[in-house]
Amino acid sequence: MSTLLRNALRKITPLRKTVGFFRKITYPKYRKLYDGLSEELGVAKAENAALQNEVVQLRRSVELLEKNVSDFAANQYRVSLSFKRNLDMFNLATNRLLYDKELDSIPADESFNPKVSVIVPVFNGQKYVKTAIESALAQTYKNIEIIAVNDGSTDNTDQILRAYGERITYLKKENGGVSSALNAGIAAMTGDYFAWLSHDDMIESDHIERLVQYLRHHKGEKVIPFAAFKFIDENGELLTEATLNARLNMFDYKTSVTDKYAPLLFGEINGGSVLIPKETFKKYGMFDENRRITQERDMWSRLIGEYRFVCIPYDTAMIRIHGEQVSNNREAVAEESGEKNLEIIEEIYGELNKENPQKARELYQYLILHYYCNSVDSMCEKLKQKSAEIKRGNKEQDE
């Protein structure tokens, strides 16, 4: 063996011996520690697997619970909708029976054929205005004029309306809001009665005929007929549940003839369903151009003291619900409508208090129940506060 090789082995051999020595000393300890850790790891893995299984079982239980809740909710919805349908059928049949009986008991003046001006205020209505105009032109009652008022539209409304030529009266003005457009139409109308048709709504072919027919039986009376209405979507399809809710909560023939304030306080007189004598605008003024949401209720509140608003139990007006409506700003609508409703309620309370103090005292309680049933909590709270103020005032007077 060469000297070089022997010297190399001398350096390596002690290192090998040292390593071997430490292996003998430490390996069993580390092996034991490793085995212990491996055992604990195995237990942890088993526990984790069990936990994962519990999570899976819990998730399945939650999914089953959600399905049961969903099935229950769906079943409750079906029951509720079925109840609404049955109640609506009964209510509608009752209203029409009473309505037809009333007309049969009062002779009609068939020679009464007043000219009706159908005013269509339009702002950027290219998507729907043609459908609205066509529904007005299709009326079975022929003594009408159609006045379309372009309220500063920036789309193709102008071209669409001009294409009708002499079939309609066309007015064009700068944008000022729906009230200003209505007022422009009223100023130009040559008819005896005013009818309002929003550019995105429609009316059935017998809409004007039915309204005029009621007036034929009540000629000379201070009455404003308004039709029941249904809701449609942007494609003209019936919104069934919304229409059922409207029939049950927004208008009712029998209450409109027994309580003159009911249509305004507990219902909804839609602008697109009324037939109003032109003379009322001379006496009570035009639509308030400062209002863009509550101009209807403001007008009705002026007229209801002298005129009875009677609901015709045939939903010949169609109100379209779509995303382009100004009234889709729900918070603004709720706030302005609430303020106007409170104002109207206070005015009517004052009138009722002169005529029938007992009925006036009950008014707020009925209204609180009405808004509670319709889930309008903000109005409930405001009415409760007002009712409490009135009670305190009455108590102080008594003392």
Image (tube, grey):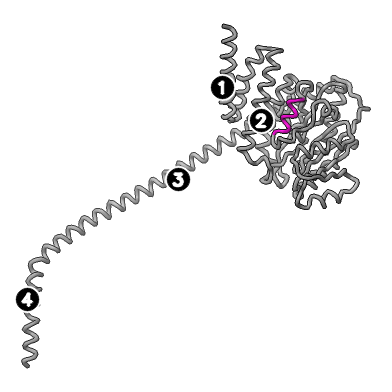
Q: Residue at x 6, y 76 (%)?
A: 17
Magenta stretch in the rendered image: 294-302
- Residue mark closest to the camera, 3 vs 4: 4
| Residue type, label 2 | Asn
Say if 9 sits above or below 326 in the image: below
Residue type, numbered disc 3: Glu
How many angstroms separate mark 1 from mark 4 (CA)?
98 Å
Residue 286, numbered label: none
Residues at marks 1 and 2, CA–CA distance in whole angstroms = 36 Å
Label 2 belongs to which residue?
A: 86
Mark 4–mark 2 contact, CB under 8 Å?
A: no
Q: Would you say 143 lies left or right of 155 here?
A: right
Q: CA distance from mark 1 to mark 3?
A: 45 Å
| Helix, strand or loop status at disc 1 | helix
Q: Is residue 337 left or right of residue 112?
A: left
Q: Does residue 1 appear anywhere in the picture?
A: no
Label 3 SS: helix
Q: Which residue is mark 4?
A: 17
In this rendering, the label closer to the viewer, 4 or 2: 4
1 or 4: tag closer to the N-terminus: 4
Q: Looking at numbered disc 1 in the image, what kind of residue is underneath it? A: Gln
The answer to which quarter of the image holds residue 139 is top right
* Label ID, residue 63: 3
The residue at the far bottom in this view is 2
| Helix, strand or loop at mark 4 | helix
User: Which percent across, then down, holds residue 210?
Assistant: 83, 31
- State the quadrant of the C terminus: top right
